């Protein structure tokens, strides 16, 4: 793009100190970069890399205990760090605006959409209510919201995640800023919605000639949207350059490592179809949720799982893919009887487990284990890792001493120190905790493992390690895995077969090659087309 | 940071702890300091404080030592406060845990039962119970326990409801732990801090309730208590202010101390909340 024009934003040797007691001295250290009008600059990094911190520093949104200790942030030649608060307020919103990650918490739940957008204009001196109103309508239409005349009177909770993010973008655009900062704006959204929002940001940026700073952790998104890229690691900019160079010819080892960890279907070795014996047969499984309903109103009925059937053999991995609300997690919970089933059969080793009472099913539980999504919520904070790992075997009648020695073996197997046994979950990182979660599931020698979004909360490099661990364990122990995920790239990488769920039904099943290259159902086609960075092959970049 | 260090950051809580320690020592040492029963006349009636150095807090209309009454009253107050709270916590935690964990019909039934108790004014019910079972220290303690468990049950139910849907509890179900085991080893330890904080404040309420009962003449006739002393003094309010003021101050300080401790425990057990206050 116009790399020769004067930069809209120039960050020079910016350093922000962390208070003592943190693992490093600087949140960001000595970073410098330029952002020109009319370009999209992606800031990529893993959690804790300081990528959001630079965005917040530009907007003056740093918490009190963090102060920039050196450097300058020049916005159109003026140093933002030297400005007083009133001057800064003039710039914020008017010439630079921000879109946040979680649109629900960034919008005031008690204010109608039109009032929230109009407020931005009012604060910045637009006194005429009629002008404001007209502008709100224009903006809502501009960001592609359906039926803006009605939608402007809605409260945020009535909108879907994607619609809320569009409202946020409309607010940010209200005063036609020259600089838009987007901090992980699509992370909380489904892939198809994400693709639309990315499109929107790109379109607006082209039309208005804005400079966009886009903070993300997802290299696929970077490949889709970035003109230039900055890669951050532990507060330091390790690499920056045009998107094509960084993505396809990464120089810094950290960038190479990150890109190598991006899930991609190329990794899927041509594995022979699993020939193990049949382990699980699900026939016409149904689960409906009823909510509300009283004397005068009919209850709202949602078919969370509708007539789902599939089979699974020993040693096989079935990917269940779908967007939020597709019923994929409910399916996993139904299989393990964490949720009641409304109809159908779940044949485990030929026996239907659906009619069993909780007490009768308990002895069978050890054969079917689960790895949960949230590595922080899934471990009891008041128990040591050892206790967490031995609880299961002890509950199933294994003597404690035997359970203990097994737990220590498992820690080794999942790649943790044996000394982890006596420590509490809080002392571990997200990836390590997820390893504990996997070890807990394996402590019972299960034959079936349900992994519900088990790597979604992890950074991409940790994600790759955990996926590799799961694959190795499967090979070693011949476990059948049901891998529930929203990320098609991961499913394509590790699954033997993929089942695509949409509104409670499996609309398509098949090996990854078939689902990817010749998707039959229109929903699958849309899903595949929305995968970020579809055209970019990270494997070619790091050969 | 250790638990006590976090606790000690709250100066009010330290002061509360100091006051309570004095009361506890006084209660335990009462028979040593005042070998004579507090019901015994030991001096001239209606001696004002410091009129006679032997009776620094004065005497009542029958010549009983106010200081001895305060010391022995501390025993009754603390005893009733601690025991009735323990009983109430046991009842409340059991009912709340069952309701929150099993939900559905069990929850409906237990919560209606709880509401039944909540709709009756607590103090009126305590008066009725003590009157029916004749006022002894046992009946008073139980009556206070019976009227004060519903808030605990509601609190515990709420905690259990939210904790039981957490992933680590789901994980405990998946590994095959039984219901009671999950309640005791997985959920209860995570719900313990709000229970302790509430219990500490309930001790204060129990002391006040006991005083009120004694004031109305529904105290144990064999035990001197602060509430009884105030009740006995009400006819002499103008002539002998010290008869009611000192027991009143004793109640005030003890209840205040316990409240301060409760707040300190709350801060120490939920450090992130304290940080938010600044």
Image (cartoon, helix red, strand yellow):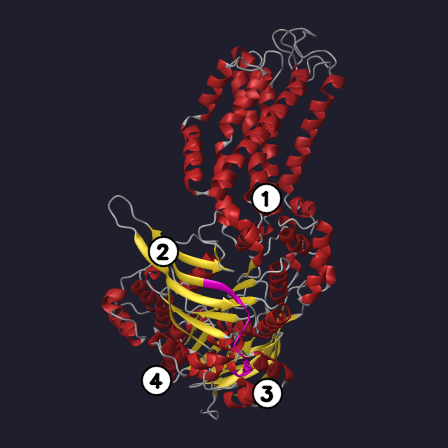
Tell me the CA gap for discs 3 and 1. 51 Å
Mark 3, chain letter?
A
Q: Give the tally of numbered discs.
A: 4
Residue A542's tag is: 3
Disc 4 versus disc 1: nearer the observer: 1
Whether A300 is drawn above or below A189: the answer is above
Could you tell which of marks 4 and 2 lies nearer the N-terminus? 4
Q: Which residue is found at the position 27% from the left and 69% from the top? A: A132
Residue to which mark 2 is pinned: A288
Asked if both marks, 3 and 4, belong to the same chain, the answer given is yes
Asked if both marks, 1 and 2, belong to the same chain, the answer given is no
Task: Give A270 or A109, whichever is nearer the viewer.
Answer: A270
Q: Position of residue A136 (x, y in %)?
A: 28, 70
Residue to which mark 1 is pinned: B181
- Give left or right: position of B147 versus A129: right
Mark 4, chain letter?
A
Asked if both marks, 2 and 3, belong to the same chain, the answer given is yes
Considering the numbered disc 2 on the image, is that residue within a helix, a strand or a loop? strand
Q: Which residue is found at the position 62% from the left and 49% from the top? A: A395
Q: Position of residue A334 (x, y in %)?
A: 45, 57
Q: Is residue B207 visible?
A: yes
Residue to which mark 4 is pinned: A207
């Amino acid at each position: 793009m116009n790399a020769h024009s004067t930069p809209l934003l120039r960050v020079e040797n910016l350093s922000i100190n962390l208070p003592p007691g943190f693992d490093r001295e600087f949140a960001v250290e000595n970073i410098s970069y330029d952002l020109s009008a009319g370009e999209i600059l992606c800031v990529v990094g893993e959690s804790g890399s300081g990528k959001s911190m630079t965005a917040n520093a530009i907007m003056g949104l740093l918490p009190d205990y963090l102060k920039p200790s050196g450097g300058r942030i020049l916005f159109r030649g003026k140093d933002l760090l030297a400005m007083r608060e009133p001057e800064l307020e003039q710039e914020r919103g008017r010439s630079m605006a921000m879109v946040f990650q979680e649109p629900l918490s960034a919008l005031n739940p008690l204010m109608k959409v039109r009032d929230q957008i109009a407020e931005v204009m009012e604060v910045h001196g637009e006194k005429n209510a009629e002008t404001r109103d007209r502008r709100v309508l224009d903006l809502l239409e501009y960001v592609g919201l359906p039926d803006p005349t009605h939608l402007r009177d809605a409260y945020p909770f009535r909108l879907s995640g994607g619609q809320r993010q569009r409202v946020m973008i409309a607010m940010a655009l209200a005063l036609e800023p020259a600089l838009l900062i987007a901090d992980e704006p699509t992370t909380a959204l489904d892939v198809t919605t994400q693709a639309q929002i990315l499109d929107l940001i790109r379109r607006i940026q082209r039309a208005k000639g804005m400079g966009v700073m886009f903070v993300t952790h997802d290299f696929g998104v970077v490949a889709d949207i970035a003109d230039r890229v900055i890669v951050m690691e532990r507060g330091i900019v390790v690499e920056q350059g045009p998107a094509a160079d960084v993505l396809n010819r990464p120089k810094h080892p950290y960038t190479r490592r990150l890109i190598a960890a991006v899930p991609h279907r190329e990794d899927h070795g041509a594995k022979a179809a699993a020939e193990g014996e049949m382990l699980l047969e699900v026939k016409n499984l149904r689960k409906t949720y009823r909510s509300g309903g009283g004397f005068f109103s009919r209850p709202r009925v949602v078919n969370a799982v509708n007539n789902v059937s599939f089979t699974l053999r020993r040693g096989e991995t079935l990917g269940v893919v779908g967007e939020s609300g597709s019923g994929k997690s409910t399916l996993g919970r139904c299989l393990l009887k964490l949720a009641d089933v409304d109809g159908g059969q779940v044949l485990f080793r030929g026996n239907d487990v659906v009619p069993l009472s909780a007490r009768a099913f308990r002895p069978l539980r050890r054969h079917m284990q689960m790895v949960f999504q949230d590595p922080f919520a899934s471990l009891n904070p008041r128990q040591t890792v050892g206790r967490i790992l031995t609880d299961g075997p002890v509950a199933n009648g294994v003597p404690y001493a035997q359970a203990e020695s097994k737990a220590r073996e498992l820690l080794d197997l999942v790649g943790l120190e044996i000394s982890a046994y006596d420590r509490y979950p809080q002392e571990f990182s997200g990836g390590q905790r997820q390893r504990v979660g996997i070890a807990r599931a394996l402590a019972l020698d299960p034959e079936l493992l349900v992994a519900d979004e088990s790597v979604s909360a992890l950074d991409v490099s940790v994600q790759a390690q955990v996926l590799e661990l799961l694959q190795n364990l499967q090979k070693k122990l011949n476990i059948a895995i049901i891998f529930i995920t929203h990320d098609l790239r991961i499913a394509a990488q590790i699954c033997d077969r993929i089942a695509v769920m949409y509104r409670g039904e499996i609309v398509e099943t098949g090996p990854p090659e078939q689902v990817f290259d010749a998707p039959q159902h229109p929903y699958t086609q849309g899903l595949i087309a929305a995968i970020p960075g579809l055209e970019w092959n990270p494997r070619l970049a790091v050969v | 940071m250790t638990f006590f260090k976090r606790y000690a950051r709250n100066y009010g809580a330290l002061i509360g702890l100091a006051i309570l320690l004095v009361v506890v020592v006084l209660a335990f040492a009462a028979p040593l300091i005042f070998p004579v029963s507090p019901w015994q006349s030991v001096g001239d009636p209606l001696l004002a404080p410091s009129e006679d150095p032997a009776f620094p807090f004065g005497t009542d209309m029958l010549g009983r030592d106010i200081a001895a009454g305060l010391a022995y009253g501390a025993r009754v107050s603390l005893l009733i406060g601690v025991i009735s709270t323990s009983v109430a916590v046991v009842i409340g935690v059991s009912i709340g845990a069952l309701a929150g964990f099993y939900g559905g019909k069990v929850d409906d039934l237990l919560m209606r039962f709880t509401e039944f108790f909540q709709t009756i004014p607590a103090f009126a019910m305590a008066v009725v119970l003590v009157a029916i079972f004749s006022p002894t220290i046992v009946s008073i303690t139980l009556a206070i326990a019976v009227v004060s468990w519903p808030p605990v049950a509601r609190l515990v139910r709420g905690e259990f409801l939210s904790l039981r849907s957490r992933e680590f509890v789901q994980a405990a179900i998946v590994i095959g732990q039984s219901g009671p085991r999950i309640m005791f080893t997985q959920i209860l330890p995570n719900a313990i801090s709000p229970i302790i904080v509430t219990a500490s404040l309930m001790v204060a309420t129990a002391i006040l309730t006991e005083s009120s009962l004694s004031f109305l003449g529904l105290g144990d006739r064999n035990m001197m208590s602060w509430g009884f002393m105030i009740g006995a003094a009400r006819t002499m309010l103008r002539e002998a202010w010290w008869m009611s003021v000192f027991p009143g101050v004793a109640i005030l300080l003890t209840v205040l101390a316990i409240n301060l401790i409760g707040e300190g425990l709350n801060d120490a057990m939920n450090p992130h909340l304290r940080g938010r206050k600044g």
